[in-house]
Image (cartoon, coloured by chain):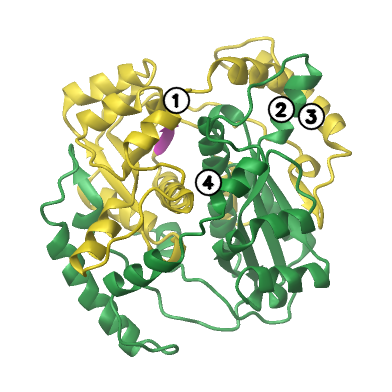
Chain colours: A green, B yellow
Amino acid sequence: MNPVIDLLKSHRSIRKFTDRKIDEELFQELIRAGQSAATSSHVQATTVIRVNDPGNRQRIAELAGNQPYVVSCSHFLMFCADMRRIFDACKRSGTEVKEGMTEQFVIATVDTALMAQNVAVAAESAGLGICYIGGVRNNPAEISELLRLPRHVYPVFGFCMGYPDQSPEVKPRLPLPAILKDDYYDDSVDQEQVSSFDETMRQYYRSRSSANKDSTWTEQMTVLFTSKSRPHMRDFLRERGFEMK
Amino acid sequence: MNPVIDLLKSHRSIRKFTDRKIDEELFQELIRAGQSAATSSHVQATTVIRVNDPGNRQRIAELAGNQPYVVSCSHFLMFCADMRRIFDACKRSGTEVKEGMTEQFVIATVDTALMAQNVAVAAESAGLGICYIGGVRNNPAEISELLRLPRHVYPVFGFCMGYPDQSPEVKPRLPLPAILKDDYYDDSVDQEQVSSFDETMRQYYRSRSSANKDSTWTEQMTVLFTSKSRPHMRDFLRERGFEMK
């Protein structure tokens, strides 16, 4: 369609990186490109921690469920939803803001994801590979302590970035009729669409170049949502000042 | 730096559109580019509703706080966080998933934002303009009813898309040292950085081509967070099956 759309459609997570480091000037451009994403009412409720310390990288790799690319990538970033900067600014101007509102959590989480996705696109446009690390939410309290995150800041996901040393297949996505609806949420075609996608995924898992298995999307989701609900998240967020009031 | 990074850095919200409609083939490519964004464990917890019905567009424009471009843009999309498709698939395979976990809310909200940002980048690469409509969270229950959203689905934001009929300035962003930290969250420079940004924004608001005002970022945030916390969000989300357990 056009080179940008082709780039977006060629995304796949990279988990194996060469030793080459990302140049500092390029890195800063990627972050600036991230900042250019839309932000709710100009709030910019995100802080990015670049983790350089090898010991902390190792610890985060373990806490995220043993993901060694957290250590081996050129740059590892923690994308944090940050309401603190706003609360501090308001306080300095003499206003006490009501904290812990659910809407603040939504704003900061969405802002952070929009920014990160721009960084992802920018990085891939420069020949880099990336991988989101949602596994940081396995142990968000320990990670927050490690990075000295203050109240009103929480780690949404980690982010590995570097020069790719692998070229995995692009993973299929659900068929358009399953995820795009006209005017109303109509799920009458969903069962059929998901069945068809299950077959697509079975073929993909059987034939991909590594970690082959015999499975479907439905089977993967079933395993995921019966085991991995991260039940600590509510209390963790409450303790960090995201009380969902 | 490169054309993609230049494109990302040139983003600004577009709120005035020509009458030209987006071609269906291009539109579907934009949604597919959106789907190519990373998704937590392949969950793909997003459904996009394209609102064609003029009456519903008008009603949403009002419910979102009188935003007429919801009506005048070529395509108006509602980006919905969707856990229902997954619960349904698990149910069909004989598993009852524990609903309402906070982590599920985070996964679905982040997935939706990542996808939308890819659609935004794809759209801008094709010469379109876009505007996120967070204002749909002013009245999320009415909007959910209008679009017949089932339980376990919620509207995260609306999204206007079309050919731009304006060319506003790019809005400045916080200085890099305020939002990017090395190894630890260190806010020792933040007050100074925000003060400097307040001056940048004062100049921007004074000199931009429309809606001039005398204000700063801190002043804008103070107004925003003392009035617009959308206190209904918690109960709304609970009623939709996002209980934050």
Q: Is residue A3 left or right of residue A20?
A: left
- The secondary structure type at the circle numbered 4 is helix
Span shown in magenta? B129-133
Is disc 3 on the same chain as disc 1?
A: yes
Badge 3: chain ID: B
Query: Which is in the foreground here, disc 1 or disc 3?
Result: 3
Badge 1 or badge 3: first in the primary sequence: 1
Discs 2, 1: same chain: no
State yes or no: discs 4 and 2 in contact (Cβ < 8 Å). no
Residue receiving disc 1: B166
Picture disc at residue B194? 3
> Residue at image x 61%, y 21%?
B225
Q: Which residue is mark 2?
A: A87
The span from disc 1 to disc 3 (Cα, nearest Å) is 30 Å
Q: Please tell me the numbered disc located at residue A120.
A: none
Q: Position of residue B34 (x, y in %)?
A: 38, 54
Q: CA distance from mark 4 to mark 3?
A: 22 Å
Which three-letter amino acid code belongs to the residue tagged 4? Answer: Leu
- The picture places residue B135, in percent across and down from the top left corner, at 42, 25
**Numbered label attached to residue A114:** 4
